[in-house]
Amino acid sequence: MNAANKKPSRRRPMAEINIVPYIDVMLVLLVIFMITAPLLTQGVKVELPQASAEPLPPESKEPVVVTVDTKGNYYLNIGDNQKKPIAAEALVNKVGAVLRRQPDTPVLVRGDRDVAYGRVVTAMTLLQQAGAPSVGLMTEAPEPAPRRR
């Protein structure tokens, strides 16, 4: 074989994508989201009664939510101290101020299933005094019944 008969070998460029770094980044992001997701839940721990109900339409404004815990304390999802109980007078004043600025804001009551019924009714009365034309009640979707064979 002489050198004149040899064809120069041409190397073709490699067209493969190395996805290992992308997988590493995805796993890091997954771990970060798994750690931070439980920290994002806010509010007071209440056990809502279960009932079948239609959810709010997605285009509606963020509602004003008054929470009534098992001890009968009121909490409001407005302001800096959302995890501190609020007095009835302050509740009426704050909700009234929101409704004067944005009259079509939905108003909801989120009552624990073990709270006295009278405390939830009192919260609804306070919201009506603040100027809420209607007050909704928040519930959890019922758990599906076990299947029988």
Image: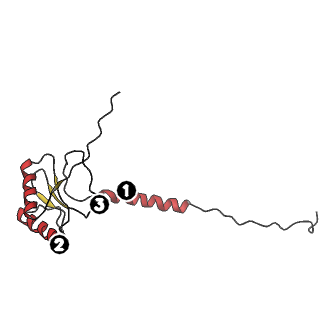
Q: Name the residue under label 2.
A: 101
Q: Residue 40 carries which label?
A: 3
- Image disc number at residue 60: none
Are the residues tagged 2 and 1 within 8 Å (C-beta)?
no
| C-alpha gap between disc 3 and disc 2 | 28 Å
- Write the residue at 27% across / 58% down: 41
Q: What residue type is labelled 2?
A: Arg
Q: What element carries label 3?
A: helix
Toward the top, the furthest residue is: 149
**Which amino acid is tagged 3?**
Leu
Q: Can residue 35 be seen in this view?
A: yes
Residue 34's disc number: 1
Give 46 or 119, whichever is nearer the viewer. 119
Residue 146 position in % (x across, y down): 31, 34
Residue 138 position, x and y percent, is 20, 52
Instruction: Tell us which disc is closer to us: 2 or 1.
Output: 2
Nearer the observer: mark 3 or 2; the answer is: 2
